[in-house]
Image (cartoon, helix red, strand yellow):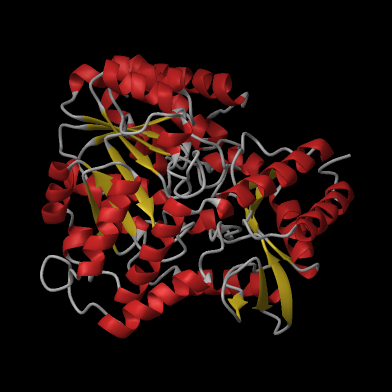
């Protein structure tokens, strides 16, 4: 039997007579990584998530680390205004909702947040799910039927791909942001199917680049398709007033289905789909991940109401984030690092070798910098990378410290000259 | 189409997209160990779709772990 060397080797084990047959081998594999001090997941935060956090490492050591791994882009998770909003809702409504939304789990604050998100995107209505993941699997599984076709960007988020697994539609991937390939697929296949849905991230979660929305909209009209954009990494952080990919390209109102999460820039929990009233009403009654899940706790909704109020009235945090992006990414490119087509707070530093990537991530952690190593099979073998997430509240000193250490380690490991 | 014919087309497609030469000695080797990734698998599948005039659900590509598994998948399209 082949010795398993990486996570990929544990996928697709089909010949077995016990569903637990893989577990002990995986346990040994993971413990070996931990013993060699190469396990970089699930470090313990000892305080609220912000730009600089007290972390408990796996070896028991405790260290203040510059947080370059979080999706809390605008540092809203511990913002006093948001915490106050959560506390107020907690006091009034208690700590849990106690029911699914369709039955006894819709509070007035759920309706308030739904309306805020609708107004934010200039849409008629919004459905709120317990997570962004469940929003994506819900909308795709509810809408798509057997004779339909789904065309999705290869770099689409896992939740979108998992949503397609719950349909009987045909699924084809188009090469990342490759509009020629998408059009070739539409030309060849459009007439053979009923409804067609084009799916893409707005801001891509591993590469930090943005979809080609103008061309996507052109193709959707030409071939009579619908389009779904996942705004998880775009809400609050791109576009002139943070309204995401549509606003970024000055195409407000043109996307058929917008999905998003309430857990990244909004720093809470949950997901949403926003669109026309008929779409949202349909999803409320046919999306299982909504129907059969308890609604979000009142405190989370109270915090999110504050967040969206801030998004609409005060974009200073977004501007701070944009300044940090310009400073950080600009300097890294000057130094010779490959950042792909990143133009957002997600900055992939492409190393190309799994071992070097792990090693650099480990050395950065020793220096007090927490960032993620992303290796095969999450990305292809030549695309291993450090994935850095910038925050609005990273100070200039923190950014410069990280740049300095990346330069040193990059030269030591031959990533830059 | 005969299986031998499909194998030749498959080998050509793999060479075109990956620059890798494959023969029967590595038909059971994991595709990733051969140096292929999911984009390569998609491009190769696209070539076979055009050749055989069929449509493949791209979710099935995730199950392609070896060249023999690709051939097994397309087995309805060839004779032995």
Q: Which residue is drawn at 26% across and 35% down?
A: A256
Using the image, determine if residue A150 lies above or below residue A403: above
- Residue A176 is left or right of residue A55, and the answer is left
Which sits in the foreground, A63 or A326? A326
Residue B50 appears in which quarter of the rendering?
top left
Count the marks: how many? 0
Q: Where is residue A84 in the image (x, y as percent from the top left)?
A: 44, 76
Which sits in the foreground, A106 or A363? A106
Q: Which residue is drawn at 73% across and 75% down?
A: A64
Q: Residue at x 89, y 39 (%)?
A: A417
Q: Where is residue A175 in the image (x, y as percent from the top left)?
A: 47, 29
Q: Which residue is drawn at 62% across and 34% down?
A: A341
> Can the viewer see residue B3 in this picture?
no
Q: Position of residue A125 (x, y in %)?
A: 21, 48
- Residue A163 is left or right of residue A276, and the answer is right
Residue A362 appears in which quarter of the rendering?
bottom right
Using the image, determine if residue A262 lies above or below residue A186: below
Q: Where is residue A36 in the image (x, y as percent from the top left)?
A: 72, 72
- Residue A58 is left or right of residue A300, and the answer is right
Using the image, determine if residue A384 lies above or below residue A86: above
Using the image, determine if residue A154 lies above or below residue A11: above
Which sits in the foreground, A179 or A279? A279
């Amino acid at each position: 039997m082949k010795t398993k060397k990486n996570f990929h080797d544990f996928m697709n084990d089909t010949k077995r007579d016990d569903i637990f047959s893989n577990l002990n081998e995986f346990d040994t594999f993971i413990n070996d990584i931990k013993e060699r001090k190469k396990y970089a997941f699930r470090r313990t935060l000892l305080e609220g998530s912000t730009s600089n956090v007290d972390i408990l490492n796996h070896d028991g050591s405790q260290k203040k680390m510059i947080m370059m791994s979080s999706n809390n882009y605008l540092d809203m998770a511990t913002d006093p205004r948001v915490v106050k909003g959560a506390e107020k809702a907690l006091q009034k409504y208690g700590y849990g909702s106690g029911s699914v939304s369709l039955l006894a789990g819709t509070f007035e604050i759920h309706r308030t947040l739904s309306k805020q998100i609708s107004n934010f995107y200039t849409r008629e209505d919004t459905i709120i799910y317990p997570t962004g993941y469940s929003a994506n699997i819900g909308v795709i599984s509810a809408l798509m039927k057997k004779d339909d076709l789904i065309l999705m960007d290869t770099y689409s988020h896992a939740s979108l791909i998992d949503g397609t697994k719950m349909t009987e539609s045909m699924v084809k991937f188009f090469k990342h942001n490759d509009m020629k390939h998408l059009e070739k697929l539409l030309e060849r296949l459009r007439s053979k199917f009923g409804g067609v849905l084009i799916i893409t991230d707005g801001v891509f979660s591993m590469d930090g680049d943005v979809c080609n929305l103008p061309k996507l909209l052109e193709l959707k009209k030409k071939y009579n398709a619908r389009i779904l954009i996942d705004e998880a990494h775009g809400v609050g952080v791109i576009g002139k007033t943070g309204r995401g990919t549509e606003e970024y390209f000055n195409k407000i109102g043109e996307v058929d289905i917008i999905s998003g999460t309430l857990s990244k820039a909004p720093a809470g929990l949950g997901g949403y789909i926003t669109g026309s009233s008929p779409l949202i009403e349909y999803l409320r009654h046919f999306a299982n991940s909504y129907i059969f899940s308890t609604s979000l706790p009142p405190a989370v909704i109270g915090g999110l109401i504050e967040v969206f109020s801030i998004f609409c009235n005060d974009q200073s945090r977004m501007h701070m984030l944009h300044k940090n992006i310009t400073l950080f990414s600009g300097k890294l490119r000057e130094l010779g690092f490959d950042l792909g087509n990143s133009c957002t707070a997600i900055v992939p530093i492409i190393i190309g070798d799994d071992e070097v990537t792990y090693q650099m991530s480990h050395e950065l952690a020793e220096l007090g910098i927490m960032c993620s190593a992303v290796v095969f099979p999450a990305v292809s073998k030549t695309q291993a990378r450090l994935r850095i997430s910038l925050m609005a509240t990273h100070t200039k000193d923190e950014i410069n410290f990280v740049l300095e250490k990346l330069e040193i380690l990059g030269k030591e490991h031959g990533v830059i000259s | 189409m005969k299986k031998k014919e499909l194998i030749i087309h498959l080998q050509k497609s793999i060479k075109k997209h990956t620059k890798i030469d494959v023969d029967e000695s590595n038909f059971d080797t994991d595709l990733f160990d051969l140096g292929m990734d999911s984009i390569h698998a998609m491009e190769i599948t696209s070539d076979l779709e055009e050749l055989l005039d069929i449509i493949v659900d791209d979710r099935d590509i995730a199950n392609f772990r070896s060249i023999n598994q690709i051939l097994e998948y397309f087995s309805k399209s060839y004779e032995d």
